[in-house]
Amino acid sequence: MNDLKIFLDIVATPIGNINEITFHAIESLKNSDIVVCENILRTKKIFYKYNLLTNKKFFRCNASTEELAFKAVEKYLKTFKKKEAINICLTSNAGYPLISDPGWYFLRKLKEKFNISTTVSNGPCSINHALLLSGFNINSFFFFGFLPKKTSELNKKIQIIKDLPTLIVFFLSKHRLKKELTNLLSFFEKKEASLAFELSKVNEKVINGKISELLNKISDDVKGEIVLTINNN
């Protein structure tokens, strides 16, 4: 175990409106030595806006580069003196990292190799945002995340949850939106649903109805975070 004192902050970033970031998150980013993020250019917009870009080292950590990101950070950490305190911020493109977003592998490896203290700077969350906009009774919910691309895998997983008596929350891809809604239609044909997108932006929109009705109402240019909530009660 390395003697470095590492403080890791899992930081929630805006899901749409850049002004929704919290003071706590800004303070954490300001005090960071290392920023591990899904997209460096996108993350730097926050640093530019709030004048935080001083003496920071950025590392890209997306779905295909998590292993490389850890190795690069591990190598960089060797340039620090032993027992020196180092602040690392882990972010994603929007909302919280780790939740249907990169970061899990990086965090696990960091904990294996170093003695770290972990905390969270809370902030925007598209799951909560969409649930609150849905108009449904939110006593409980099940978060599914993104749908598998393979039909066989999708069918297998939906079969497991299709009878859960609760709200079910999905992340949908803007590139496969109509196809994914069509796939879900056969499992939840009679259920009420809420589709929310462009969350926290000027053009934020929520469409309620059965999935067949949602398919008729949406356009082909839906943008931003897309969250589908199905009332399966």
Image (cartoon, rainbow, N blue to C red):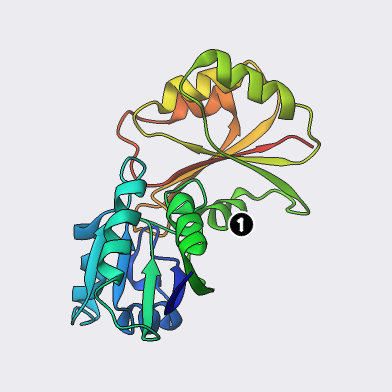
Q: How many marks?
A: 1
The amino acid beneath tag 1 is: Leu
Say which quarter of the image contains residue 58. Answer: bottom left
Which percent across, then down, holds residue 210?
62, 28
In the visual, does 6 lie left or right of 47? right
Q: Quadrant of residue 84?
A: bottom left
Question: In the structure shown, which secondary structural element does the residue marked by tag 1 occupy?
Answer: helix
Q: Can see residue 186?
A: yes
Query: x and y percent of residue 217 in the render?
Result: 45, 29
Q: Image point 29% across, 48% down: which residue?
A: 68
Give percent across and percent down for residue 94. Answer: 39, 56
- The answer to whether any part of residue 188 appears in the image is no
Up/down of 121 relative to 31, above or below: above
Q: Image height check: is 16 above or below 8?
A: above
In the depicted view, which residue is nearer to us: 10 or 78?
A: 78
The image shows residue 225, relative to residue 149, as above or below, that is below
Category of crowding for the residue at label 1, using alpha-carbon neighbours closer than 10 angstroms: few (below 14), some (14–19), many (at least 20): few
Quadrant for the C terminus in the image: top right
Of 27 and 215, which appears nearest the observer? 27
Between 79 and 165, the one lying in front of the other is 79
Residue corresponding to mark 1: 132
Q: Residue at x 49, y 52 (%)?
A: 104
Residue at position x 35%, y 30% in the image? 219
> What percent of the width, then of the height, locates residue 179?
44, 20
Q: Classify residue 17 by image quadrant.
A: bottom left
- Residue 158 horizontal side relative to residue 118, left or right: right
Q: Residue at x 49, y 69 (%)?
A: 1
